[in-house]
Image (tube, coloured by chain):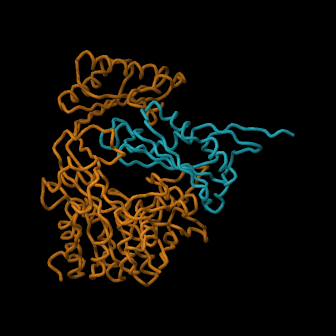
Chain colours: A orange, B cyan
Amino acid sequence: MFRIGCGAGFSGDRVDAPRSVVAAIAAAGSGGALIFETLGERTLALGHIARRQDPSKGYEPLLEEFLEPILAQCVTAGITIVGNFGQANPPAAAKAIQSIADRLGLGALRIAIVCGDDLTGKIDLDATERWEGDSRLPEIDGEIIAINAYIGAAPIAEAIKAGAQIVVTGRVADPALALGPLVAHFGWDWADLDRMAAGTLVGHLLECGSQVTGGFFADPGRKDVPDTANIGFPIAEVEADGSFVITKAEGTGGLVDLRTVKEQLLYEIHDPASYLTPDVTLDITGVQLSQLGPDRVQVSGARGHAAPECLKATVGFYGDWLGEAEISYAGPNALARARLAVTTINERILRRGLALRHRADIIGTVSAFDSDEGDLLFDYSDTGAGDYRVRFAFASANQRDVERAAQEVNALYCCGPAGGGGVRQSVRPRVRTLSHLVPRHLVHPSFSFAGGTP
Amino acid sequence: MNATVQVTKLHTIAHGRSGDKGNRLNVNIIAFDEKHWPVLRDQVTAERVAELFAHRGVTEVRRYELAQLHALNFVIEDALEGGVNSSLAIDTHGKCLSYLVLGMDVQVQDEMVTGTPPGAEMQKVP
């Protein structure tokens, strides 16, 4: 049996979470792996911008905080760390990790760097197809920051087989973070598609951290979760046949049951018979779950089909400017005054001829569910009183127009409805992303050891 | 005696989570108890979900059934106002949107569906 835990489900996750995971795997006494998934579509583009500004940056900003508390125990207990925390600059991340090891007196670690995902300047996007899910989005109309392909588990597995204690990657398919260590441990054959599917499913369930152990799940009275302030992150106990149990460390909060596993099983899945990854097409339509005991759910029945011919690549490019401005209305007739603020700003933008996209939300009514056009905004019934925050959002390639629109919201202080207060405004540049499909033969994943370690 | 029919929110018999990839939203809807699976299967249709999101310019809703999990998965195209990097919405990921679906009315026969949902007994907060 092989244990894999997850230390982070996104960039910005709880930095104290990995401790209980590592302690539990170490206590079991037979080594294992710890994965960190800290790379979203937007995070990667931001990493590239950070690296441009400072060649020593561009990796996960919380890297040191994630690793410092657990690095020594992982090394001692034979727990391999695999993370896409290299983001846009895996070599710099490897250097930072060795610095932590030096501070902790751990000596030179075998840190592998996976590369080959960064296609920036190496491919002709016009010769590739756009990923169907983004097919109706506008064309790329800003300077391209980066192109990164989702690569598979092979370089991770090879690095671990070659003795890596830590594997630093940039963009890889999230489940590959788990599949790599599993292939290295069990020696699974890449052509054994059901094993590839099982390992991919392990990764899919682990990759979002506590989302499978009671995070993003609590709904008081319907779905109660114990000790949400100390939710334990997941550990998968994987057998050689690919079946596995999802659990978490004893003494932590959260829960693992059929409901938490089902929600995560289908999270960001489209066709359940055909979840595309670089390593395999995962079919979860026959997956069986069974609760073996408290916080222990067994998962089996993943099936694999041939991997797709193309890899998905994320294209990050400079986008437009986003302005946000807010103002509050409270007490008798608050909703009517909030609506008047909306129509006033709409009219002001027209009169000033500002060319921008805009929307208004009245927070306290239907802001989260509404469309940009505000279809639901004026149908919501007025209770006669309340505490509403009006939030305006503006976007344009023209920074000055966005600033002018935000300034119009500020002007509601004097020129708007009665009793408006608490204006806050911000204007910032946006990074945008689109996905393209890149033929595999254009992508060459590989790994090397940092610092020339043989 | 005739069967009685009660109208309730989907939220009382089901749970779910939404996720995004680009401008594509997925929402899974899962019955707490297998006895309510037919309610989901028969009443929570792709057409009704498309209606809920019509004002957001949805172009297509595909529904997948996972009977052994008592779960439905909806793939909803163009519901995210351009996606996380270009939306003007507060919730650019659409993480709130599973609850738009869970607010849907469904008809349940012969029972009260208030109180603690089945399957939660093991997880009571101590």
Residue B85 lies, in percent from the top left, at 30, 43
* Side of A313 where A120 appears, left or right: left
Q: Quadrant of the C terminus of chain A?
A: bottom left
Residue A233 in view of the camera: no
When the figure is inspected, residue A371 is found, relative to residue A349, above or below; the finding is: below
Residue B119: quadrant of the picture: bottom right
Residue B77: quadrant of the picture: top left
Residue A105 lies, in percent from the top left, at 23, 81
Residue in the foreground of this view, choosing between A383 and A210: A210
Residue in the foreground of this view, choosing between A253 and A342: A342
Residue A236 in view of the camera: yes
When the figure is inspected, residue A219 is found, relative to residue A243, above or below; the finding is: above
* Side of B2 where B63 appears, left or right: left
In this view, which residue lies farthest toward the top? A351
Residue in the foreground of this view, choosing between A12 and A416: A12
Residue A90 lies, in percent from the top left, at 21, 65
Residue A258 lies, in percent from the top left, at 58, 61
The structure residue drawn at horizontal position 20% and vertical position 81%, both measured from the top left corner, is A108
The structure residue drawn at horizontal position 23% and vertical position 31%, both measured from the top left corner, is A396
